Amino acid sequence: MSDALPLRPFVIEALTDLGATVSEGDSLVWVQAPESVHRNLEVAPSFALAFDPERSREFEAELVAPGSYFLERLVSVVARRGQWDVSQCTVTGKEWISEALRESGLGPDTADFSLVDGIEDEILLLFAFRVTLVSDEKRESFHLVAVSLVDGSTWPVDPDRADARLFPHPSPGIRPDLETGYRLATESLRTMTSVDIERFRTRSLGLLEEEVRRIFGYFDRTIDGLRESEPGGSQDLLRAVMAERDRRLTEAVERFDPKASGSLCSIRAILVPTARLQLEFPDGTKTESRLDAWSGRLRGLVCSVCGGTAGPWRPSSPDGLRCATCASKPAESARPRGRPRSDTPRRGMQVGEASARSPGGSKARSRGASEGHRHP
Amino acid sequence: MSLPAREPPPSADASLTLRFDDSDRDVLARAFRTPGEGSPAWRLNGEAHRISLVDGFDRLLAWPVLQGVTRYDHQERTALRVLRDMRGRAILADEVGLGKTIEAGLVLKEYAVRGLVHRALVLTPAALTEQWREEMETKFSLPFAVLRSVRDWDRKPFLIASMDTAKREPHRGAAQARPWDLIIVDEAHRLKNRFSLNWRFVAGLSKKYMLLLTATPVQNDMDELFNLVTLLKPGQLHTYDRFLERYVASPDRRVPMRVSELRGLLRDVMVRNRRGIAFTLPPRRVHSLAVRLSPAERRLYDDVTEFVRDAYWSASGRLPWTARLTLIVLQREIGSSTFAVAETLRRLAQSPLFRLDERERLEELRQDAAAISSNAKAARLRAFLKSVDEKVLIFTQYLRTLEYLRGVLEADGHRVAAYHGGLSPAAKDAAVRTFRADGEIFLSTEAGGEGRNLQFARTVVNYDLPWNPLRIEQRIGRVHRLGQEREVHVVNVWAEDTVEANLMELLDRKIHMFELVVGELDLILGNLDERRSFEDLMMDIWVLRQAEERRSALRRLGDSLIRARAQYEQVKETNDAVLGDTGEAVSA
């Protein structure tokens, strides 16, 4: 059970959203729940909740705490709801574009100018996943992965910011390509979690190896001892010892065998205005990018050192575009130019951020065909 | 290395791939085909998942949901050490009274909360199965069932079985055919011999985690320690020959060598917390209030006893099990009060378990009981209470005795808080609060008291004596526990020439039970070479017809108890010498 979120607001809001009437007292919370809800939660139609174990005996209140039966039931009920949602992000004017560029480090002093090719509505998909690593212990994490079906880019989203600037959208007619989105999201999640998964695997296999070595050491020496002490001794005894060894080894393998699984918790479709941009940097290079009003993320830019796509950015001649992390590193630590980008995410950058689109922008695009927007 | 494998073993070369649930397809198939439940529901879905995430064993999650469990640091540290460092395979070897059962329950609960244990088996001596079930249910909300039939191995994911039953067919095969996430073996010193059926049975169980509970891993010689550790982690103490050569002084196998090195190896698999000075409890003082029954009570007691003996040795052959139990209940109730026995006599007088002539005798006994309104034990108790000016806990086994006592004590002007199994949890809370605030007497039928702390009082009156000594100890444990700073008084009210008088002879005079530390009695009774429960032994003696036969059987049992206590003392010394500080000294 995680400490990531406080329990009380979650429980109260969840019950209210389920249709229950909730009134808060000093130490107890009183709940009146409709039939479907109290049946699913396995409680009486009216009941009290206690968040302090000391108070849970009063009025036979249901205790809400990690591991409590009521919380387990509520989590299970809530997790079966809200598996999809449509929201929209609305903006007025174009100020958000220059603001987002500034926040990305591409303000007027760094990017020579940017042209807005056009602004269009795009559907971003936000996939929520729960990742579980199990051997003889369990480690879980929660991830949000945003997917653009237009350019195939994916990026992680902070769960605490998943609601920012979004409003409910009446969703009739929204049928995004979930298959493609899911495929891109799961590929991205694999990359995002690869370091943690590898660390978990290495540790589990290390423990297994230690266990296997000990078991072999014990049983093989025991067998040797039996053979030495009684060269013509019972073969049945030796076979029994070997069988016991094999059984113990199987048990060890089953115990430490690491497994990694992900499960889709929910999907959100976000209707968001997205600008097509052409950026020109001080060294004269030009590139195309997409910028949506919700995430403020410039898509299509790639760090010339680490290959990351997250930004913020530090364009500097003659080295080209760099992310802020690489730009702050001493030159010798940077990857020599010309060497292929590594697929391994670097420490300090958001892993799994990749674009299916070519990082290089087209210089052939007619500027006249675009709606020009020069920085002031 | 060739691993025997039911499924392909993990390879050090292969990478671990994140696999996605098939259930994802269901979400994809349903999504956006109908309107969702709204943005708040979507956000709450994410919060529900985030709240229920599990991340290793950085802390214990289950404390807040445990009922009536006092939080002690040494238990928390032990549970975390078992979960994190020992990875769920450990010998819990605390000195008696430091809460091995709680530590095991904590570990189990933490695994269950994290979804790592779905099937668990507790193996105990037969006499402790019900106690384990009750404790797991009331304190840890774990739905354990006691093994009743061979089908239970399939049907009950949380099972408690007596070792003696489980190790024999058809149970043995059924138990070993299924993988267990966690196995707990209580009184694990019974696994001291690796050639025994017990040891081989446990070794043959397929398990992920295993906890072995014993205060005395070494009973006789060092072999036992080797066998116990090898069951848990073969190779931890090397091979048997190497262990003998390095850690056992030849020819005396009771004497360890290289003790410090040995303890180093044991620390990987064993936790042994010891009582520090601050954990030492104040002494107990025992007061015996012997009572001579009134002539009417004496006559009824003798008549009931005669009926019980006659029925027990009935000419019609062996009694059905239920009838035998009924007779035990009858004899226990008459030891409590005539009020307790009257209702049972009425029921039995109509029961087909007994013949017509027996039913007629039972009806006569009922009428005799109903005609008695005075109570010699109560009179003695009331006189005693006049000499006391502090809070007193009075325990009785029967509700009818409780109601009678409440009436007479309130009539005497005492402020009485009654506490029994028929009360709701809230009413029980209220009774404890009342007693604490301004009550004089806490009158209770529940020996365990569900782990409630009543150590603000220090006087316990046993108005009647349960035949199971562990129940008596539980009563005393309500006040004689951590936090008690004053001397504790245990007052036993008993009538002469009754089963209870025999109990006092054995428990008080022979083994000084009332002065033992909580938990020691378990081990002493465990040393008795008896397959039967203590209650059964008492009944066996009581139903003997000849007084001389009864006296000599009682003497034999007394001698066995004295030997059992001496054996326990010796084993305790050996364990202290061998194991020493594989844990920590516990202070308050």
Image (cartoon, coloured by chain):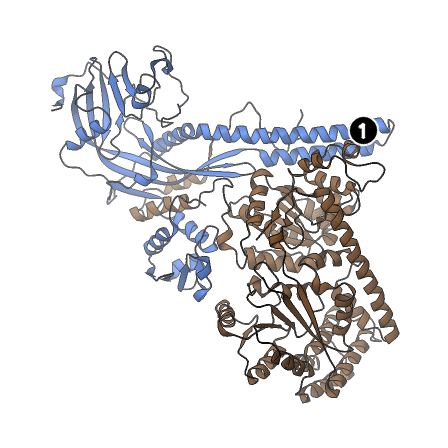
Residue indicated by mark 1: A225
Vertical side of A86 occupied by B502: above or below: below
Image quarter (top left, top right, bottom left or bottom right) of the N terminus of chain A: top left
Q: Nearer the viewer, residue B6 or B181?
A: B181
Q: Position of residue A152 (x, y in %)?
A: 31, 27
Q: Position of residue B514 (x, y in %)?
A: 70, 65
Q: Position of residue B309 (x, y in %)?
A: 80, 76
Quarter of the view holding residue A219? top right
Q: Which chain is brown?
A: B
Q: Residue lying furthest top in this view? A: A338
Q: Residue at x 13, y 20 (%)?
A: A369
Residue B529, visible in the rendered structure: no
Q: Tag 1, which secondary structure?
A: helix
Vertical side of A340 occupied by B210: above or below: below
Residue type for callout 1: Gly
Q: Position of residue B290 (x, y in %)?
A: 73, 77
Tell me what hue chain A is rendered in.
Answer: blue
Vertical side of B284 occupied by A146: above or below: above
Residue B573, visible in the rendered structure: yes
Horizontal relation, residue A259 to residue A231: left or right? left
Vertical side of A307 occupied by A63: above or below: below
Q: Nearer the viewer, residue A45 or A347?
A: A347
Q: Disc 1: which chain?
A: A
Q: Nearer the viewer, residue B314 or A342?
A: A342
Q: Residue at x 40, y 63 (%)?
A: A47
Quarter of the view holding residue B485? bottom right
Horizontal relation, residue A21 to residue B476: left or right? left
